[in-house]
Image (spheres, coloured by chain):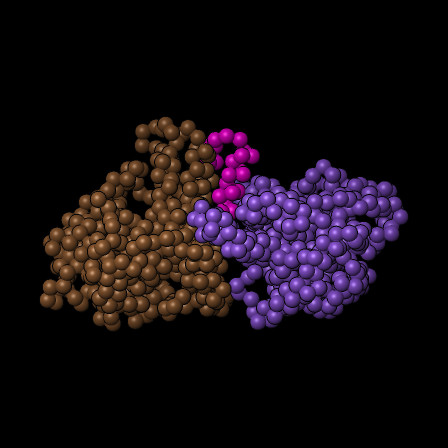
Chain colours: A brown, B purple
Amino acid sequence: MTMTDQFIYTEPDPLELAEYREQVQTWMNENMPKRDPLNPWHPSEDDNERSSRNRELQRRLHDAGFAAVCYPKEYGGQSLTVAHQRIIDDVSEGFDMPILFSAPTLSIIGPILLEFGTEEQKQRYIPRFIRGDDLWVQFMSEPSGGSDLAGALTRADKDGDSFVINGSKIWSTFAQRSDFALMLARTNWEVPKHRGLTMFIVPIHQPGIEIHTIKMADGTDEFCQEYFNDLLVPAENVVGKVDDGWTVATRLLFHERAAVGGASPYTQGKMRQRRADSLEDLAVLAAKEPVGDAGNRRQQLGRLETLNRVHRLLSDRVVRGIKGGHLPGPAGSLVRLFHGLVGVEQASVNMDLYGQQALVWDEGASVGDHGVRFVQRQAACIGGGTTEMARNIISERILGMPRELATDKELPFNQVPRNG
Amino acid sequence: MRYDLTDDQEFFRETARRFIETEVPISTVREWHDLAEGCPQNWWRSAAELGWTSLLVPENLGGGSISDRPIVDLSIVADEMGRGITPGPFMPTNVVADTIARSGNPAQQTLLEEVVSGQAMLAWAVNEPDGLHLDNNFATHATPTNGGYTIAGTKVAVEAAAQAHHLLVTATAPNGLAQFLLPTNTVGLTITPQESLDLGRRFAQVQLEGVQVGTDALVGSPGAPTEADVCRQRNIMVLLQCADNAGAASKVLEFTVEYAFDRYSFGRPLASYQALKHRFADMKMWAEASCAAVDGAADALAAGQAEAQMISVAKSYVGDYSVELMHECVQMHGGIGVTYDHDLHLYLRRATVNRGLFGTPSDHRAQLSQMLGY
């Protein structure tokens, strides 16, 4: 890793940690809603309810001093260690958590503002999202291509003290209920693709932005596409330097891979909490309505338990390995890849364990989620950077194998061939 | 290899690696295949001088470790021995020494001095012909007699039985499990060498026919205390198998990556083909995840927290993926990878034995599920 990391990785005193665990447990018991394992992701809730529930829960964590504890004190965090955050994650497993804040706001956007933001940007934005006031999204991918991020076509043209933005972004999560976005746009078309991009902070609810939700194969509609029509963004909203947005984007991708893979010190609670894929929950359900023979069921559950635990151990190992210089920064991709494969396995095992109940079910029964989820299975290997990209990164940047051929690297961007 | 070693542990690891590279390169490993005893006694003594047999033995009994987590220290050696497919009765000697140190009587504990110095090897006679006995239900019986026991039964796949000075025999007694420490020249005990897929380590069958022993041969008290000892022995054994396989898988991947850079076809190195790069990426993930599983299992065992679960997690993952990685590396090598002269099959042989003994990955998945109440 070339940049400094702000979080503290040193191991604190075990005794202190044990006390901390007790504190968190007591507080959560008294203040956070219990999560229902049979109905963990509030399927009946609409977007508004979901957003306000998450904001309210984030606020509760913040007021008790358990929100974003790895963030520096001066920006609303607690300057505690990763070990403290992991305790909160552990304890929070049985509770409803403000999981919407975990990614991208706390684990991807926040670290970028800490690293590249001006002092004024940090003071202005970070305490607000730690307190639950603002949700952020990423405006990165474009309809023209997801993996080739540096090929962005959205343009930002300087006009006095502002930039005028035109174009479209896609796959932003929950944009319609969010407040701010980090956006990558092209400010220079005369230079090669990596050298003409700039990163901006964009307030979402303003003229010039139109948001459409995208209905996914599983029926959910948390992803959005945005259209920008002469959107004005003040120059003070540039993050990092003009035309140097790729430097920022590279770090953003690093944090994204860490967050998606579960290796981020800034996530809060467990990502998987969003859906019924905690193994304990699955076991509860499987015991309630068992399918197939017990030996086979044990093999499948044992395999899932193994993969889930190794996932966590791998994520710890990779964080340690990068920190100690045993692994290069891109090693986060190992965890991202593992995460995708576990997701696939999980969806497949669930499908088998629920058998026909996941195919045809009584009206309103939540067991059908597992069937729907199986259809949506590959999403775990696509969102947050495809597993193909992860495999490229691992082979090229960890094992040092030759890079894939790219013809557009040194060409001025306006000469690069592109979609129709 | 762990990424959180202390300076002392790192020095210990580096010393082990250098010792293996200079004293037992693969060419020597191949020469030792012809030795009935598996490895020269004087070599084992020099390995012992590096501390390979002292880690689980407390200082007052002549042992000593590198850190306050001797189990972790031990896994460091296993990882390095896996990288070098190094022969020697490392696993059974340490597993049995640990039990003698914890539960043995003072007379038995005096043996540890010779174990620590490498003059004596130890073996654990536990496996039986009809399978696994993860449920601790052994056909080998210890029947109480006047002032002692008569032991009868057959043990197989006993590593280093023919080389060891003493055997730890696990048997069913009226009050539960019992373990006995027997000199290998005990009357009624027949040791017959067996052949093994692993060409480096030595295994034998142990036949016990009306073996008469006094109660002074008991290690610990029969029943629950011995069951706890047997569980710990199995946990340490599986940890060492997994560390051995994780080290071996990392090493095999390293030299196969090198091969992919050196080997050209159609005018390009193999390492430039995306179809192969992606498979190498998967293998790198398997190797790191295998090491991570070993890290977790060693930590759990050292802390004594839910260790049986983590041990089964490790066997379930490392058992499968380390061996799968080696098969993939054979595929990457092409024809040369399936020849006797190439080292790959030596790694694969040993890793396959580690994968299967003391529970296959499926056995451990089933166990894990049961422990969690699924």
**Quick one: which residue is furthest to the front in this view?**
B267
Residue B111 lies in what quarter of the image?
A: bottom right
Q: Nearer the viewer, residue A77 or B238?
A: B238
Residue shown at 53%/55% (left/top)? B262
Q: Is residue A158 visible?
A: yes
Q: Nearer the viewer, residue B176 or A151?
A: A151
Q: Does residue A191 sit above or below B196 in this rendering?
A: below
Residue shown at 62%/44% (left/top)? B338
Residue B171 shown left or right of residue B14 in the figure = right
Label total for image = 0
Q: Does residue A163 sit above or below B35 in this rendering?
A: below
Residue B217 painted magenta: no
Q: Nearer the viewer, residue A233 or A266?
A: A233
Q: Is residue A67 visible?
A: no
Residue shown at 16%/66% (left/top)? A235
Where residue A128 appears, as percent x and y from the top left, is: 24, 63
Residue A293 painted magenta: yes
Residue shown at 45%/33% (left/top)? A352
Q: Which residues are magenta?
A: A286-309
Q: Nearer the viewer, residue B350 or A25?
A: B350
Where residue B180 appears, as percent x and y from the top left, is: 79, 51
Q: Main secondary structure of the magenta part?
A: helix
The quadrant of the picture occupied by the N terminus of chain B is bottom right
Q: Does residue B93 sit above or below B125 in this rendering?
A: below
Residue B59 shown left or right of residue A239 in the figure = right
Where residue B202 appears, as percent x and y from the top left, is: 75, 50
Where residue B227 appears, as percent x and y from the top left, is: 69, 49
Residue A381 shown left or right of residue B21 in the figure = left
